[in-house]
Image (cartoon, rainbow, N blue to C red):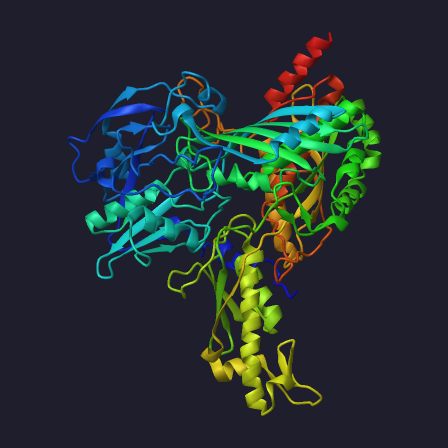
Amino acid sequence: MTQFKGRREDDRLLTGQGRYTADWNLPGQLYGHFLRSDRAHAKILSIGTQGLEGVSVFTGEDTKDLKTPPPQLKVPGRGQALKVPHRPTLAEGRVRFVGEALALVVAESPQAAQDAAERIEVEYDELPAVVSEIQSMEEGAPQLHDEAPGNLAFDYDYGDEKAAEEALARAAHVVRVTLDSTRLAGNPMEPRSCVAAWDAANNRYDVYCSSQGLSMMTPTLHTIFGLPAGSIRVHARDVGGGFGIRSQPYMEYGALMVAARRLGRPVKWTGSRFETIATDHHGRAAQLSGALALDRDGRFTGLRFDWLCNLGAYCTQGGPMINTINPAMHAINAYDIRALYGRHKLIFTNTTPTTAYRGAGRPHVTYLVERLVDEAARQTGIDPIELRRRNLIPRSAHPYRTPTGSIYDSGDFPMLLEKAVEFSSWKDFEKRRSESSRKGRLRGIGCAMFVEPSGQGPVPKEEAFIKFGESGNAELYTLSGSTGQGHETVYPEIVGEILGIAPERITLHASDPAGPALAGGGTVGSRSTMQHGGALAATAYDVIRKATDLAAKDLEVSAADVEFEKGTFKVKGTDLSISLLKIIQKHGSALDTKGHMTPQGAFPSGAHIAEVEVDPETGVIEVLRYTAVDDCGRVMNHTLLEGQLHGGIAQGIGQALGEHVIYDRDSGQLLTGSFMDYPMPRAGDQPRQLDLYDHLVPSPTNLLGAKGAGEAGTVGAIPAMANAVLDALRPLGIHHLDFPYSPARTWEKIRQATVKAE
């Protein structure tokens, strides 16, 4: 495929010409600052605003008519539907987590708004708080919502409980593992911010905010305000990172919209890094328990999951779905396991609400299953690679129906494993381990297989629009929301290849509120290339069909005698021809086309191997080498693919080595509210050697044969890192260690093992 050198976006972004949310400024705008709760759980007795001059203050009384964002999950649970307590835009009578917005102060400058907010006096009646999902389920635990007794929001199960229990009962070996999937802050480079304006002449709001797609934000805002479609326009030009936590409108946006309409002037708010860490929706946060049954030959015969998932204080739109439907789709991972059962309880706590974060539930599955597999290898004495070989789903079994009914569309899991073993020099590892030992270091290697759902979505169709100008240039319209993936580069490449037009002549308009009305979804779940790219491809083929008729008329022949190849229409058996470019220049808007595709998901897969070295004197872990072999279907642009994998692997390593949102167990106070306390992955944490390879099996579910790659790096890196570190520590008798593998935590575990051995 024709490719640019680098990304088209780079020139704009690297020269300071990007336009992020904080770069939007509207005439006459005011500035907002949010007063936030410093208590995890308390009744609000009063909010004192006396003596404040030159500012406007909005509280829950001003926003009480706004509705709760509807969750995406619609399936029934075990005897009850998902409980969705009202989530106020600004706190109404009670606060339920540290950082919840109490009031919005609006002034002529950001400084004046902040100064006034700091003078507001809030009187609380403090209530006991509960921060862990386990603690929240205990008898007598503080209750967050009257409509959710026992703090249980949802009890969800899938698979066949009887079959799984019978498999476990008959098994020659049963391996059990319980893991803490630590809470994470998404921390996009761009802090959350918003500009809201009310257009009285057109009876319409304009909202400027970071977004993963117009269709993910606008309908929800319409629901929150009870307004008809077209009453709210969402604008997002450049977005500095998404990772799932930019996929729904936050409550602050509604408060700013109320203020803008009431005051008759635009209101702008730019959040701080503390607000990003403390109040952006968090990720992960679950206790994962699993049991794996094996027969005497090491074949996997059954699998059971029991999860406790921390929703935080309220339901987000995506949080319930990523802890239920997503993991159920691939709970067996890449293995041929016929008996499966899972039960996941979703629980309210006095913490920031959780939602989809890069991987959106899939890292939970791969982390737990791959830890079970490595633990099974340890307990049975079977080599971990050999154990995987015996149980992987063969290529010939695709399309493969899982015990929950999802269909793995295509793949070659055994070959992914063999290539990863070869390219990582796994067979020579013991020599390298000995070399590290001579230096007083502990060396470990870990493998992780994965298969994950991608491109899924509830939308019935994905639409795109291609518009042509007299010059022969084309403009593309989609509902995608790029947060750094390079859509402006790859979508013109896709359409350019089909139409035979240089990509430089094609421009993308993504989620343009002034563009044509389109149906579809946003940029989540590794769906962009499959669905938005696929819709553009389908539309481009519709353009060719239209252009064929026009070319036939211009050439004065039957359309059946015209064939299209590499941008040119030719009359079969003659030298008569006309280029598509000339057709466009002559007929222009006659070729404008809205097309669509019916979204179908796919299942990318991979085998990742991490190799690490642990310094037992300090607990510091160095990632020496990382080898990834991925099947993401047909590759559109290798440079962009590698960027996605690099970023995903970096985030997976970040979760393994350091990232962890921590609340004080007793008070519910956030203890990791800055980068002084919350360690982001740094360059020194990344692999000394990172090798990426393909083993591609195109998907039959979409025109492009793509499968998705945006989350694969994270899904593979988390279990690969866990298995590698524990392999390094195993000679000391250490077989379990929860994330994060920080130097302090790792050193303490080594110290305890050393004392015990003495």
Instruction: Between residue 754 and residue 180, name the one nearer to us.
Output: 180
Relative to 1, is 662 above or below?
A: above
Q: Is residue 470 visible?
A: no
Q: Position of residue 648 (x, y in %)?
A: 60, 43
Q: Position of residue 519 (x, y in %)?
A: 44, 60
Relative to 715, is 536 above or below?
A: below
Instruction: Between residue 11 and residue 487, name the one nearer to us.
Output: 487
Among all residues in the image, which is located at the extreme top?
758
Among all residues in the image, which is located at the extreme bottom?
556
Q: In the rendered view, does 171 fall on the left or right side of 110?
A: right
Q: In the rendered view, does 312 fall on the left or right side of 691?
A: left
Number of numbered markers:
0
Instruction: Between residue 682 and residue 460, name the one nearer to us.
Output: 460
Q: In the rendered view, does 88 fall on the left or right side of 610?
A: left
Q: Position of residue 403 (x, y in %)?
A: 64, 40
Name the quadrant of the N terminus.
Answer: bottom right
Q: Is residue 252 visible?
A: yes
Name the quadrant of the C terminus.
Answer: top right
Q: Position of residue 734 (x, y in %)?
A: 70, 19
Relative to 69, is 222 above or below?
A: below
Instruction: Between residue 280 and residue 173, name the one nearer to us.
Output: 173
Residue 369 lies in what quarter of the image? top right
- Look at 84% across and 35% down and name the residue there: 428
Relative to 298, is 716 above or below?
A: below
Residue 81 lies in what quarter of the image? top left
